[in-house]
Image: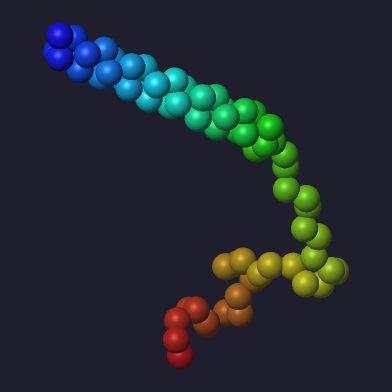
Amino acid sequence: METLIMLAAGTLLIALGMRLIHRLNAQHDARIAAYRFSDPYPVIARPPGHRHHGPADRAPGRTGTWP
């Protein structure tokens, strides 16, 4: 009789744990669905004359190392 009670209690605890995990996953999925990951970033415009200088814009004879 004690064995049956222990099996029933264990089964009940496992079922409650599975239900809790399922509900937490559902909440997490709802949060992910509500957040828009695909929104593009706004364009960051630089003022005229302040563009980023790449490697081709360096002065001749400079290697870019210190000093």
Image point 57% across, 68% down: which residue?
55
Residue 38 appears in view: no
Q: Quadrant of residue 32?
A: top right
Image point 19% across, 9% down: which residue?
4
* 59 up-or-down from 19: above or below: below
Image point 78% across, 50% down: which residue?
42
Q: How many marks?
A: 0
* 63 up-or-down from 15: above or below: below
* 55 up-or-down from 42: above or below: below
Query: Seen from this angle, which residue lies furthest bottom?
Result: 67
Image point 48% across, 79% down: which residue?
63
Protein image colouring: rainbow
Decide which of 25, 51 is in the foreground and name it.
25
Query: Seen from this angle, which residue lies furthest right?
Result: 48
Residue 27, horizontal then vertical, whole percent: 57, 29
| Image position of 2 (left or right of 47) | left
Q: Quadrant of residue 59?
A: bottom right
Decide which of 21, 44 is in the foreground and name it.
21
| Image position of 6 (left or right of 47) | left
Residue 1, horizontal then vertical, whole percent: 15, 9
Decide which of 63, 46 is in the foreground and name it.
46
* 10 up-or-down from 37: above or below: above
Residue 65, horizontal then vertical, whole percent: 45, 81
| Image position of 32 (left or right of 48) | left
Residue 7, horizontal then vertical, whole percent: 21, 13
Residue 56 appears in view: yes
